[in-house]
Image (tube, helix red, strand yellow):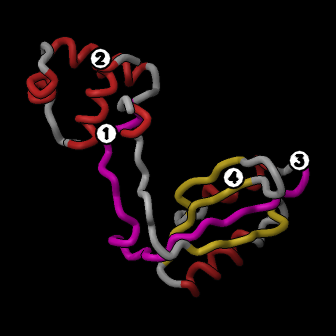
Amino acid sequence: MDDLDARLLVTMRAHPRIGLTELARQLGVARGTVQTRVDKLMAGGVIKDFGPTVDPARTGHPILAFVWLQIAQGRLAEAVERLRSVPEILEAHGTSGQHDLLCRVVAKSTDHLQDIIADILTSPAIQRTDTTIALSTQIPYRIEPLLLPR
């Protein structure tokens, strides 16, 4: 990835609905160059999607929690399959250390969060949870600082 790729990505993130022609104009390169670069970044998995960023709070799920899970030995695949069936689990990451998985979970209320956790714990593959509710977001998801030179 070079400087043009970085500028391309930063511009696309700042203006998600920008067309290739306008992107080329803003970057001062040919439209074909932009198309080639975007195709290369997509093929390489750098650009994962073009979907809108959706705010779960605005969809009726204002509670954001991080739920650590301890999984029964040898039952990770079973646990993950169970977690996939819970729509409020936005993502799950395998971790090192005391816990096995970290899940980002949204809920309509704290009672709803409690119900989600109780539901998760019905799986024999999941032994224990440890939950932290986020009170605010101090730094939202960002990638631009990694792409731009300091």
Residue at (81% x, 60% y) in the render: 70
Q: Amino acid at mark 2?
A: Arg
Q: Nearer the viewer, residue 39 or 5?
A: 5
Q: Which residue is mark 1?
A: 50
Extent of the magenta region? 47-73
Q: CA distance from mark 1 to mark 3?
A: 36 Å
- Under circle 3, the secondary element is loop
* Residue 99 x, y percent position in the rendering: 79, 57
Instruction: Give the residue displayed 14% in from the left and 15% down from the top.
Output: 29
Distance from the alpha carbon under mark 3 to that under mark 4: 13 Å
Residue 93 inside the magenta-drawn segment: no
Q: Quadrant of the N terminus?
A: top left
Tag 2 residue: 37
Residue at the spot of label 4: 81
Report how far apart the C-alphas of labels 4 and 2 lie in the structure. Answer: 36 Å
Q: Position of residue 145 (x, y in %)?
A: 40, 39
Q: Amino acid at mark 1?
A: Phe
* Residue 23 x %, y %: 15, 28
Residue type of the residue flagged with mark 4: Glu
Counting residues from the N terminus, which is met first, the one under dot 3 or under dot 4? 3
- The image quadrant where one finds the C terminus is top left
For the point 70% across and 52% down, which residue is it? 80
- Of helix, strand and loop, which one carries label 1? loop
Q: Secondary structure at mark 2?
A: helix
Callout 4: SS: helix
Q: Is residue 38 above or below residue 18?
A: above
Q: 15 left or right of 110?
A: left
Give the labeled residue for mark 3.
Answer: 74
Q: Earlier in the sequence, mark 3 or mark 2?
A: 2
